[in-house]
Image (cartoon, rainbow, N blue to C red):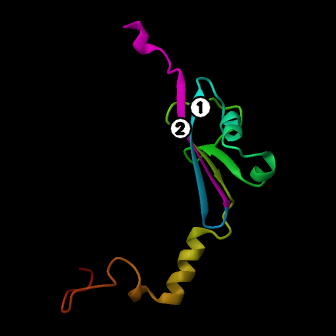
Amino acid sequence: MADDARAPAALRVTVSASLAPREVCEWPLVLPAGATLAEALQAAGLDRAQLSGLSVGIWGRESPLQTPLSDGDRVECCRPLMVDPKVARRQRFARQGARTAGLFSARRPGAKPGY
């Protein structure tokens, strides 16, 4: 029964990187227990030149490269945003108009507004 409480001998992690616009690459990896974020990036074949300017983290939270990984973690390498999502949404609605976009844009004929 004490064997069940031990840490796993290997970690299954996924490394995901967006190296170019509209491009996402994923690598499922099996690493030894105690592996760090930097070791996962190296095992995926990503070098420092490819990672320059990218934010690196685990499950969307930026983390230092020395962070130890847990089984099932998702390592993410993300490029910085070019446009604030709120500003982009305002611009899109200004172009389209509020009536042609959104949840209530397609209604049944004769339906009440908002349904």
- For residue 47, what is the image quadrant? top right
Measured from the top left, where is residue 57 in percent x and y? 63, 44
Boundaries of the magenta span: 1-19
Give the residue type at disc 2: Asp
| Quadrant hosting residue 35 | top right
Left or right side of 73 for 78: right
* Picture quarter with the C terminus: bottom left
Quadrant showing the N terminus: top left
Up the image or down, 42 lies above or below 79; here it is above
Vertically, is 29 above or below 80?
A: above
Q: In terms of depth relative to the viewer, which is nearer, 17 or 53?
A: 17
Query: Is residue 5 found left or right of 111 in the rendered image?
Result: right
14 is within the stretch colored magenta: yes
* Residue 85 horizontal side relative to residue 44, left or right: left
User: Which residue position holds label 2?
Assistant: 73
Rendered residue at 30%/85% (across/down): 106
Q: Position of residue 59 (x, y in %)?
A: 54, 44
- Which residue ends up furthest to the left in the rendered image? 110
Identify residue for label 1. Answer: 69
Q: Secondary structure at mark 2?
A: loop
Crowding at dot 1, Cα within 10 Å, few <14 / some 14-19 / many 20+, comes out as many
Q: CA distance from mark 1 to mark 2?
A: 7 Å
Nearer to us in this view, 79 or 93 = 79
Q: Are marks 1 and 2 in contact (CB under 8 Å)?
A: yes
